[in-house]
Amino acid sequence: MTFALLGLSGPILHAIADLAYDAPTPVQAAAIPAILSGRDVWGSAQTGSGKTAAFALPLLELLARSAGSSTGASRRPVRVLVVVPTRELAAQLAEAVRSYGRYLADPPRTCVVVGGVSINPQMMALRGGAEIVIATPGRLLDLVAHNALRLDDVEHLVLDEADRLLALGFADQLDRVLALLPARRQNLLFSATFPPKVRALAEQLLRTPLRIAIDAGATLGETQALINQRAIEVDAPRRTMLLRQLIQTHGWSQVLVFVASRYTADHVAEKLRRGRVAAAALHGDLSQGVRTQALADFKVKRVQVLVATDVAARGLDIVQLPAVVNYDLPRSAVDYLHRIGRTGRAGETGTALSFISADTEAHFRLIEKRHQLRLERERVAGFEPVELAVPVRDPYGGVKGKRPNKKDKLRALKA
Ligand code: AMP
């Protein structure tokens, strides 16, 4: 299979050749002809499967085919609206769209519309119009309210990472955005997982869609075969030391480390820096400028270790990331899947490592069970855990780790 056979034309094929994409990935082979024919698509494809190009290439092709036919040269109405959950994903998509479209005779203008940064430059950028808008929902609504943007000419709507959009509480804003769109349009919905809310949205939105299930969403599928998953037992206070040692012994050029809180992200990055490891934190409390810089530094390998919270790391596309470390375990089995999907991408193998302590063993078992997985627990010499792994039954019913947590202490005080 080749990209030319899928119906893409010269300028786009030229850009693909520049990027050295030899052949379409399965999601691209399925989605590109369907999108070109105007069909709705429901794709359960993860980041790493090539889903960005799967929708961006045919949409650029469609825009190019009809460029100038309906609009005066001076007016550039929004024809493609891509709604995404995070600013980072928006920036990344815009970069991809610009590179795929750069040989087109009249490349569409692409604007990124996201919160967390000043609204004025976005209003300015939209002044001359933009055929493609990539947006997070809140800021998009703000700009519509300011009359900086109209959505009544949108022909193609893409909801990318729809599961995350809903999980982050964007449902109401998304409904308001949908109400602003013309009824006749093409809808493309991509999601790594399909919890009931996403299914309901898909059913509300899509008309006889082509369903593409590159099904890594439900359990660990083909993509994950490229990921070497490991679990290492270590006491929580020694994780940063162990992390440093692992980076050295494995010679990882780059590591994405997931933590549970903003505080931990800062703290671990700082400790690594003190140990002469080039590390940066990425979380939602940082200004957009700092986040963009951290990401850019990581991409050009000025930063070796990026310590991130889930939301901040969502959708990051860093090619050939050799390792992902769960310093703190993810809250859910679905998050586990998203996290480990950051490595083993586009045909590369990668390592996804989880730190397990006495307190988190039971939680990790649940994640394993959900994915029908059972990883051997490893230990690293010098970092063998000493905390008891034996759970004690607390007097209130649930099985807890040996140390009482805050809630337990409050209950004990009240008793
Ligand atoms: P995505 O799933 O869209 O985040 O893409 C994951 C990575 O795969 C990106 O770095 C893309 O540039 C790359 N990619 C997308 N399509 C192909 C392809 N057909 N061949 C090789 N790499 C690709």
Image (cartoon, helix red, strand yellow):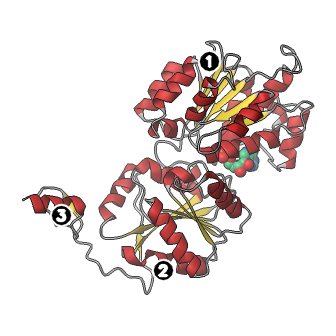
> Which residue is found at the position 52% from the left and 55% from the top?
285
**Amino acid type of the residue that numbered disc 2 sits on in the rendered structure:** Met
**Amino acid type of the residue that numbered disc 1 sits on in the rendered structure:** Leu
Pick the residue in front: 261 or 198.
Answer: 261
In 3D space, how far apart are the residues under numbered discs 3 and 2 (Cα atoms)?
30 Å
Please provide percent x and percent y for residue 31.
68, 31
- Residue designated by label 1: 181
Are discs 1 and 2 less than 8 Å apart at CB?
no
In 3D space, how far apart are the residues under numbered discs 1 and 2 (Cα atoms)?
52 Å
- Residue designated by label 3: 409
Q: Tell how many labels.
A: 3
Please provide percent x and percent y for residue 96.
75, 43
Reply above or below: 85 against 299.
above
Reply above or below: 86 against 257.
above
Circle 2 — which element?
helix
**Amino acid type of the residue that numbered disc 3 sits on in the rendered structure:** Lys
> Which residue is found at the position 23% from the left and 70% from the top?
403
Nearer the observer, disc 3 or disc 2? 3
Q: Residues within 10 Å of mark 1 (few under 14, many from 20)?
A: some
Q: Residues within 10 Å of mark 3 (few under 14, many from 20)?
A: few
Reply above or below: 362 against 61.
below
Q: Can residue 42 be seen here? A: no
Mark drawn on residue 241: 2
